[in-house]
Amino acid sequence: MADDQGAESELQVETRLAARAADVGDIAVTSLVMPHDHRPTWRHLLPRNHFTDGVPGGGDAGGATGDQSADEPSVTMGDLRIRYDGCRNLEELRIPADVSFANSRLYSATYPGPIYGLIMIKCNGRVCIKESNPVVPRFECQVGSIVVAMNRRLIPYGAPFQRVLTVLRDALRHPPVTLYYVDNDDFISYFKESFLPSLPPPKIFKAPPPEKEDGESDLDYIARVFGTGFVSSKSSATREFLQVIANDESTKCWTMGSRDFKNNMHTWENVGLVLAANTNLESFHLEFIIGSAPNLTEILIQLQTNKSLRQLTISCNSRMIDSRIVQALSLYLHCDNNRVSSLALIRFEISGADFIGIAQALTGTKITDLSLVGSIFGGVNFRDASSAFNLLGQLKVISLTNCRLGVTLCKALCCYLPFWTNLEKMDLSRNRINNKCCAMLANALGGNTTMKMINLKDNTQINKGGVEKFAPILCNGSTLEGIEYSNHVLNVEYNVREDEEEILGCHPKGIRHLLSINMSSGSTASKVRRKIETVMFEGDFAVQRLAMMHVKLMPRTLRFLSHPHNKMAMNYKCSFAAMYHLIRNYDAAELFGFPSAERARIDFLERKNSELVHTENELRKKAAELFGFPSAERARIDYLERKNSELVHTENELRKKIRALEAEIEDLKKEPRRACKRHKSGDLVP
């Protein structure tokens, strides 16, 4: 972890912790009891048989042997802490194997995600926590905690540190991972107050060399900056090197090949120093050859102080990616100064473990654009690919061009593709994608309305049947709501045979026609209308699609049908055919049924009657309150009662007339039938 270049604001700290919390998840901590009848020492913090397995290739697993004699007095860790107080010589800060570690605590922490927030270091044969940056404050995994086991596999005294890290990295492939810690207050004090201050200071990033001297040639100046390892003599390369060294404002992109330098660590360190000091470079492309992995690691270490880079590209010539590169890349991407959002690893051979390591290196970083162009995934199985794709949910752009992806890796990708809510572009060109893969991809992207591009070009096993699988994503024509909530920005790039290309576009529902709508410059609403015209009406009006719509939507439907462009789109023969069919066939009495004059008169009288009754009731209430009625009010009440009686009588008369008219109408309807019957009976008479 690089040193802080400046104090973070509270908002930045909260944002960083929230991002890490999303990746880490809840960490389960369990307090355990130290084994009974066991006197812990530095060599034997736990008995040999406490766990069934140990780290392969580890040191002395040990047991309660020679240094466990209860009769022999032993030096305690508290004695050593007092003895070493103030000592800053690392060679003198030795802990004998038989030092007693009484009053120690044992606990476990289970990590469900790929980020632990820990930096480990080897201290006198034991793996300890050097730095702890937990997601939330908690008591476990503090600086000075001793890692004694992982996943019930004992980490013995003297185990090679790199071997422990390798086993831990392998365990990360199948989370969760449980680490077991031993804490001792005296050791923690010794570790913080004596051991850590005695460590050699971290490498200081030197400033770039002074400017070019008068009379000094370009090659001599570059050799003075980079050292004798610079071997390139190309004029173009020389000019670019000078611009990068001078921190030229116009130099935003730089491509450097490892062939320009000898395999000299000092030279590569100087290259890293120049890159670290550059404040204008935004894109860096390194082409390296096999055997220069340590040099690349050195550059990545130096780049931890650079704040200008936004895009990093590393290319090789079909070589297996080195685990050291993955580790250095992870450290660089997780450093506080890193601003890289685009990473490209080109022409590598990637195994399952490497793919998981790359995904873990990207988790919790700012990387949103990942390109693995030309990288071979031939040996990656479904399980490893699934574990890797599960960690890449933050990506907006992913390019897997020419990676030999087939059904297996496509299936693993589709398992997690629905959860990649940020994904906008995906390039799967020049692979082994077939129609079955297209069906899986279309199903995985079924609910994605923000995906903008998927490139399937140069997949020779895809034909028109596979491309058509993406049509429901562009336009779900089952309902009006389905069309509205379809993807209106997606572009599917493909190439099929010329005869199949014509078939894909001849039908209004064809994928090419839907893509042309998506690629048009109109608004989303206009694209929805065009898809309704194309899919719902299919060149001829179908009233069944609108039969279930609420009658209140009919004015909007009529306005939609009356638009000149829409009229021709829905029926190519007659521009008014759609509206005619709608009015002729739509069964909605609320829209096309009108009340008669008698019914309107009755409704009016009923409203008036209700008003009169209400007035009468109000007057009766007043009369009851006054216990008497003045003559004028009584006359008014009598008048209203008479009017009410007349209205009721008129209503009854009108009802009788209506019933008579209805009976007469029924007779008129039956008359043609009776005449028909009489005619038929007359024909039957001999």
Image (spheres, helix red, strand yellow):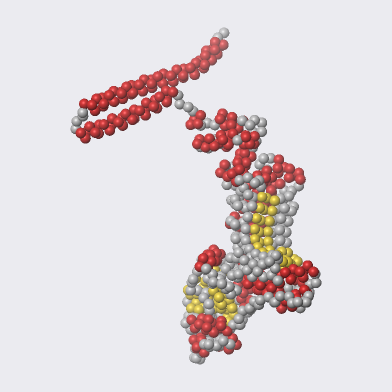
Query: What is the total number of numbered labels drawn onto the structure image?
Result: 0
Q: Position of residue 285 (x, y in %)?
A: 71, 66
Q: Is residue 175 above or below residue 230?
A: above
Q: Tell me if 602 is positioned left or right of 454 in this view.
A: left
| Rendering quarter of residue 308 | bottom right
In the image, taking residue 317 as reference, residue 10 lies left or right, namely left
Rendered residue at 62%/36% (across/down): 566
Would residue 483 be seen by someone viewing this image from the given angle? no
Residue at 59 percent across and 31 percent down: it is 579
Residue 204: quarter of image: bottom right
Residue 557 against residue 344 in the figure, above or below: above
- The residue furthest front is 214
User: Against 244, is 435 above or below?
Assistant: above
Q: Residue furthest bottom?
A: 72
Residue 444 visible in the current orientation: yes
Depth order, front residue of 145/423: 423
Q: Position of residue 434 (x, y in %)?
A: 70, 52
Q: Which residue is found at the position 42% from the left and 26% from the top?
A: 600
Q: Quadrant of the C terminus?
A: top right
User: Residue 176: x percent and y percent?
Assistant: 56, 67
Q: Nearer the viewer, residue 72 or 12?
A: 12
Task: Name the spot of residue 251 as percent of width and height, x first.
Answer: 70, 66
Q: Residue furthest top?
A: 686
Name the residue rendered at 64%, 76% in the picture: 205
Position of the N terminus, as image quadrant, is: bottom right
